[in-house]
Amino acid sequence: MDGETVHATAVLIGNRAALIRGPAGSGKTRLAFALIDAARAGALPFAHLVADDRVRLSPAHGRLIAAAPDTIGGLAEMRGLGIRTIPHEGRAVVGLVVDLAAADGGRMPAEAGREIVILGVRLPRLAVAVGQEPLPLVLGRASTLAGA
């Protein structure tokens, strides 16, 4: 699969994935597990890890495909607990980019920052400011992801 590997985490929500980006320690894995827990609690129809820490991205027919690099498929680092093996999806179509600790995140995000182009694919983007709780924001956008 051609493409690039990026520092991110990806979670399949319904039939589209959220690509979660941000600096080390910004809460990418914590958000992924919160989304998976939200699905278990019935707040989302489905959520499963695709990849944690590193995500292989590839464009295909106007879509962006996320997958775990072969060496880390099914592995996730839980701070304070170490590396854990968890169920995961082999690949998923990205439907949303979530940028944690984003400089342009805020109460009323600018229209210009609501989309991003990655490897030639235009995607909706959610910018989350430092100190802002990302889960409610992602849950608010998840209805468009899950049904896409």
Image (cartoon, helix red, strand yellow):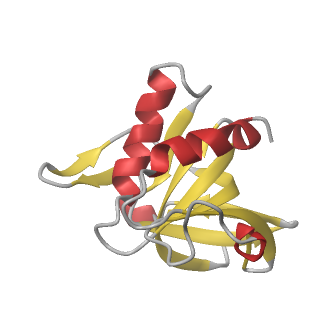
Residue reaching furthest left?
Answer: 80
* Residue 45, placed above or below residue 129: above
Q: Nearer the viewer, residue 47 or 113?
A: 113
Residue reaching furthest top?
Answer: 42
* Residue 35, placed above or below residue 125: above
Residue depicted at 51% across the width and 41% down the height: 136
Q: Quadrant of residue 119?
A: bottom right
Residue reaching furthest right?
Answer: 61
Q: Name the spot of residue 125 as percent of width and height, x first.
A: 67, 64
Residue depicted at 55% across the width and 65% down the height: 106
Q: Nearer the viewer, residue 103 or 59?
A: 103
Give the quarter of the figure containing the C terminus: top right
Q: Nearer the viewer, residue 103 or 144?
A: 103
Q: Name the spot of residue 1 as percent of width and height, x first.
A: 66, 71
Residue depicted at 45% across the width and 63% down the height: 70
Q: Name the spot of residue 51 as percent of width and height, x first.
A: 46, 56
Residue 74 at least partly seen: no
Question: Relative to 123, is 77 on the left or the right?
Answer: left
Question: Relative to 146, is 20 on the left or the right?
Answer: left
Q: Quadrant of residue 15?
A: top right
Residue depicted at 80% across the width and 80% down the height: 120
* Residue 17, placed above or below residue 119: above
Residue 77 at least partly seen: yes
Say how many tags the image has: 0
Q: Quadrant of residue 142?
A: top right
Q: Name the spot of residue 3 as percent of width and height, x first.
A: 65, 79
* Residue 36, placed above or below residue 138: above
